[in-house]
Image: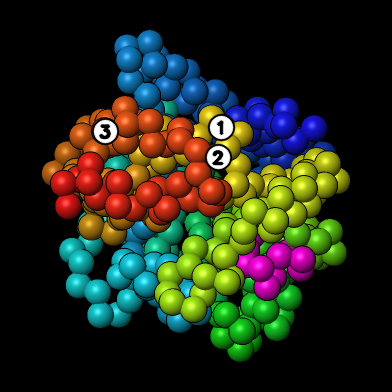
Amino acid sequence: MRENFNLAEYMSNGIENVVKGIVKASFKNPKETAFILKYALASKEAKKKRMEFIDIGENIPGFLIASITSSCNLFCKGCYARANKSCGEDIHKIQLPSERWSGIFNEAKELGISFILLAGGEPLMQRDIIEKAAEIKEIMFPIFTNGTMINDEYIKLFDKNRNLVPILSIEGNEEQTDRRRGIGTYKMLMEVMNKLKEKGILFGSSVTVTKENLSTVTSKAFFNKLYKKGCKAMIFVEYVPVSDGTQNLAPGNRERKILEDEQQKLRDEYKDAIFLSFPGDEKYSGGCLAAGRGFFHISVDGSAEPCPFSPYSDTNLAECTLREAINSPLFDKLNKSGMLLSEHAGGCVLFEKEQEVKELMNL
């Protein structure tokens, strides 16, 4: 039963199943197997470190989301990052230098953080930062990319550094993907997946779920095509209405129930793959995981924000340590306010409660 679904347990078991699947195919994929086995040990050590912090009254999240650039080479319709001015060619935010990002990644390792999701903009536009991430083998770096910049040089980088895991954005079938991301994007993604499979490189896919593509992206046929190309993770991100006239695209309660049910069918069918929905799975984690409860977002300029959909901050990592940022005044207020655990209509609670977050910031 879905009511008994435990997200933390699923993630733990899911990674173990991916490991088993890779080990089973080790004669074809020795590089991935070697990395995964080492990472599994590092992950246990990381959890031990986080538990030690809990013993002294501090909560260290298991993962972070880091937007490492405000630039992007695509102009996707309904892009949240462009709409909230965190991405675009005319954005003049001060961006953290690669050396500071390197410092943040090393601090994360010492704190016991196991995953850092690299986002943007288009993160592959910052190869120097990607290379800094590659050096920290104890952390897995899923890279949320549109996939169009994955050339032979990036394939070599991913092949050599298995802690870099490309997560390719796709919107459904060819017509749905090209309509949002540009003509030819779908075929380019299929070619990239073929190259990744050829090298035995672990990768996943992410989908922005709307009312228009829901039936496509939750179908077995859709995932099975990606699975045969080597995809081992699917992340469903509910569309957030960013401009007038697009509210009708956002999933409602009916669509969320369909997503939930179909996702569970995929989990039951594909035991060696991981399926997550954001923010859908948060209700099985006792509430919203933002603001350091389970993760937080580091923006391009180093601002520590509750999550990408709540871009407010009173602490900047250009001026403090990662540990200090986790204990920021805003995060403390959000956790003590009970807002993260509150009932809401569904979707992203902090996006819905924007005014209340602003009030905590005295904006």
Q: Going from the N terminus, do you reach mark 2 or mark 3 first?
A: 2
Comparing labels 3 and 1, the label whose residue is closer to the camera:
3
Q: Total of numbered circles in the picture?
A: 3
**Labels 2 & 3 near each other (Cβ < 8 A):** no
Q: In this view, does 110 lie to the left or right of 94?
A: right
Question: Amino acid type of disc 3?
Answer: Lys
Which contiguous range is marked in magenta? 204-217
Side of 8 where 298 appears, left or right: left
* Residue drawn at the location 57% of the way across and 26% of the way down: 41
**Residue sitting at x 56%, y 32%:** 285
Residue 211 belongs to the span the image colors magenta: yes
Residue matched to label 3: 333
Q: Which amino acid type is shown beneath numbered disc 1?
A: Ser
The residue where tag 1 is placed is 285
Q: For residue 282, which numbered disc appears in the image?
A: 2
Residue drawn at the location 57% of the way across and 58% of the way down: 238
Q: How far apart are marks 1 and 2 (CA)?
A: 5 Å
Q: Is mark 1 on a helix, strand or loop?
A: helix
- Is residue 203 something that shows in the picture? no
SS class, disc 2? helix
Residue plotted at (20% across, 67% down) = 93
328, 243: nearer the viewer: 243
x and y, in percent, of residue 104 in the image: 29, 42
